Amino acid sequence: SDCVPCGRHQWSPPGSHECIDRQPCREEDFVASYTRCFPGNNSRVRSWHLAHSSKCDPTLPGSIAAKAPETVACAPCMKGWARHDATGECVKCPEVGQMRDLKSN
């Protein structure tokens, strides 16, 4: 027999013999992505997107929408690294005898 497409609000994994109804999207169906840190102010933008593995349907009643992008603090640099003011990137402390001030990022 031929392969046939699932209905509009359904999905199926490869090799499946049946279609599965999609569910409304929930908060756990979304993942965050981040921009690079902005130079000089220790912040970045967090955006939310549907996870590639999500099988939800954002058009179904009861689905939640992705959260709006927001400005958040950059993640701290690793021990021995410091945030470069001009680029916003974490870099190794360049000189022997230097360390990262633990009160800063």
Image: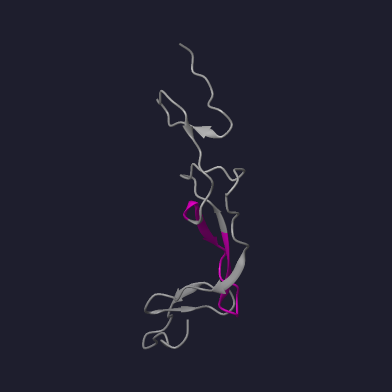
Height in image: 10 above or below 43?
above
Q: Position of residue 36 (x, y in %)?
A: 56, 66
Height in image: 40 above or below 59?
below
Q: Position of residue 7 (x, y in %)?
A: 56, 28
Looking at the rendered structure, the number of numbered marks drawn on it comes to 0
Q: Nearer the viewer, residue 17 or 50?
A: 17
Q: Within the image, what quadrant is residue 95 found in? A: bottom left
Q: Residue visible at 56% across and 42% down?
A: 57
Extreme residue in the top direction: 1
Q: Position of residue 30 (x, y in %)?
A: 51, 54
Q: Is residue 105 magenta?
A: no
Q: Nearer the viewer, residue 103 or 83?
A: 103
Q: Position of residue 68 (x, y in %)?
A: 63, 62
Q: Residue visible at 60% across and 46% down?
A: 61
Q: Residue visible at 48% across and 45% down?
A: 54
Q: Nearer the viewer, residue 38 or 61?
A: 61
Q: Is residue 45 magenta?
A: yes
Q: Within the image, what quadrant is residue 48 found in? A: bottom right
* Range of residues picked out in magenta: 28-47
Q: How is colour applied across the structure in the image?
A: one colour
Height in image: 21 above or below 103?
above
Extreme residue in the front direction: 61
Q: Residue visible at 46% across and 44% down?
A: 53
Q: On the rendered image, what quadrant is the N terminus found in? A: top left
